[in-house]
Image (cartoon, rainbow, N blue to C red):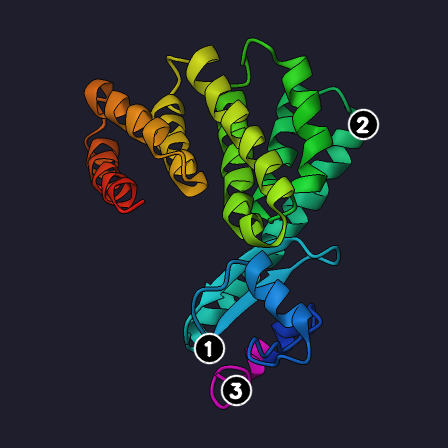
Amino acid sequence: MDAETFTDDRIIELAKKFIPIKVNPEDQEHPENIEAVRRYQVTGFPTIVFASSDGGMIAKQVGFIYPNDFAPVIETALEKEQAFVEQLAKLEKTPDDAKLNAQVALTYLERTQLEKSLPFSKKAFEHDPKNKTGLIPNLHNQLAVTYATEVEAAMVRAPEEAEMYFEKAVFHFRTVIDKYPKSDAKDPAQYYLGVTYAIKGEFDDAIAVLEKLIHHTSDANIKQNAEAMLERVKDLASSH
């Protein structure tokens, strides 16, 4: 990409709106590089992350891409950031708007900014207890998935943190399952709850949750994924 994409005149012009930083994840002298890979969930190279000034992930591009295809990616990232700035400005004028709070919280979660999402999540939950916005179950799910993602990462370096993340993930998944049983978010919540139990090594609970999901879900894709996950969990359980 250095030779072909980043030398394109249009890309050079668009890139002026960002501060480019090149990260080498194999550079052991700079552990912040490894942290960037973890934070932005980099799984392949090259990966280009468009980040806000406070470190939020606006967008991500994985793999080589030609200039003509890359330009729209940059433009979309700029548009997303502008839309979010405008959304925050609206929220300043109506700070108790449940829908705006939920939308901002979801955007922060998408940007891998859990801590920034929390005050907006709290307000959304407080001002929309009956889910009139239709966003509350999904917000619980996204919070839960974010906490669950942190469980595995923390299990080795900080077991107490892992337990805290685990409890919060379970709480939010259970909230969706118990409080919003008719929402589209229920089956995904039950699936990822099973996955979260498995990550924590609580295989009996994982098996029970997944078996229950397989029995009642009408979503063929979720059922297929749950059946595959159930087999994996049973294999893990038998090896422990």
Give how far across and how far down residue 4 sits, in percent: 47, 87
Q: Distance between the residues labelled 1 and 2?
A: 40 Å
> Label 2 amino acid?
Lys
Tell me the crowding category of disc 1: few under 14, some 14 to 19, or many 20 or more residues within 10 angstroms, Cα based.
Answer: some
Nearest to N terminus: mark 1 or mark 2:
1
- Which range of residues does the magenta coloring cover? 1-11
> Label 1 amino acid?
Pro
Nearest to N terminus: mark 3 or mark 1:
3
Give how far across and how far down residue 229 sits, in percent: 26, 40
Q: How far apart are marks 3 and 2 (CA)?
A: 44 Å
Q: How far apart are marks 3 and 1 (CA)?
A: 11 Å
Determine which residue is flagged by label 3: 2
Give how far across and how far down residue 126 sits, in percent: 68, 15
Determine which residue is flagged by label 2: 93
Residue drawn at point x = 73 percent, y = 38 percent: 88
Give how far across and how far down residue 240 sits, in percent: 32, 44
Question: Left or right of 52: which side holds 183?
Answer: left
Which image quadrant for residue 163?
A: top right
Indicate whether 36 appears above or below 235: below
Residue 2 located within the stretch drawn in magenta? yes
Which image quadrant for residue 89?
A: top right
For this orientation, the residue located farthest to the front is 240
Indicate whether 23 appears above or below 227: below
> Label 3 amino acid?
Asp
Q: What element carries label 2?
A: helix
Q: Is mark 1 on a helix, strand or loop?
A: helix
Mark 3 or 2, closer to the camera = 3
Nearest to N terminus: mark 3 or mark 2:
3
Indicate whether 4 appears above or below 65: below
Determine which residue is flagged by label 1: 67
For this orientation, the residue located farthest to the bottom is 3
Tell me the crowding category of disc 2: few under 14, some 14 to 19, or many 20 or more residues within 10 angstroms, Cα based.
Answer: few
